Amino acid sequence: MSAPQTLWDPAQVRLWLERRVKAARADQDVADRYGRDREDDYDKAAAEEWVCEQFRHSDAVEDQARLGEALKALLAKGDFYRAGVRNEQRFEREVKAYLRKLAKMAKTNTGFGKTLRYQ
């Protein structure tokens, strides 16, 4: 049998987003210290931070379906920009991948309880 579906908890989702922003910033700091060797890691962490910041204070988090629609709309936009990234193409690719991951999490309502730094 499958596990029972848990109720949508906007407070838990916001907490998860806040923790992911903090973890992404810490990952960017570490990647920055290592320079050119960790540019990929920097862009990946920057993409994670950018996506989480888009929804951290958004009203879309209040409803599971609205969050899914907002994620799909942002993914359809297809043009993402953030100053300071090392490689814009890699950053856009990572943003799209993270948006798809978050959309899957929102659809299944799983993973938002994992608030530790390393996922």
Image: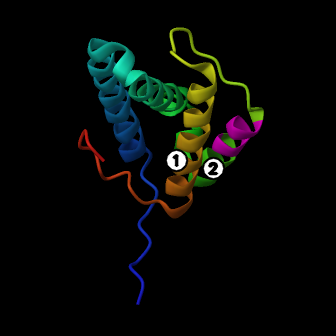
Q: Which residue does the image show at 29% across and 51% down from the upper left?
A: 114
Write down the quadrant of residue 60 in the picture.
top right
Q: Earlier in the sequence, mark 1 or mark 2?
A: 2
* 33 inside magenta stretch: no
Q: Quadrant of the N terminus?
A: bottom left
Q: Amino acid at mark 1?
A: Leu
| Residue annotated with mark 2 | 68
Instruction: Kindly give the residue lying farthest to the front in the view shown.
Output: 37
Does dot 1 land on a helix, a strand or a loop? helix
Highlighted range, magenta = 71-76
Magenta stretch: includes residue 73: yes
Q: Is residue 35 left or right of residue 91?
A: left
Q: Is residue 77 left or right of residue 17?
A: right
Q: Could you tell me which residue is drawn at 51 percent across and 63 percent down? A: 108
Real-space CA distance between mark 1 and mark 2, rounded to the nearest whole angstrom: 9 Å
Q: How is the image coloured?
A: rainbow
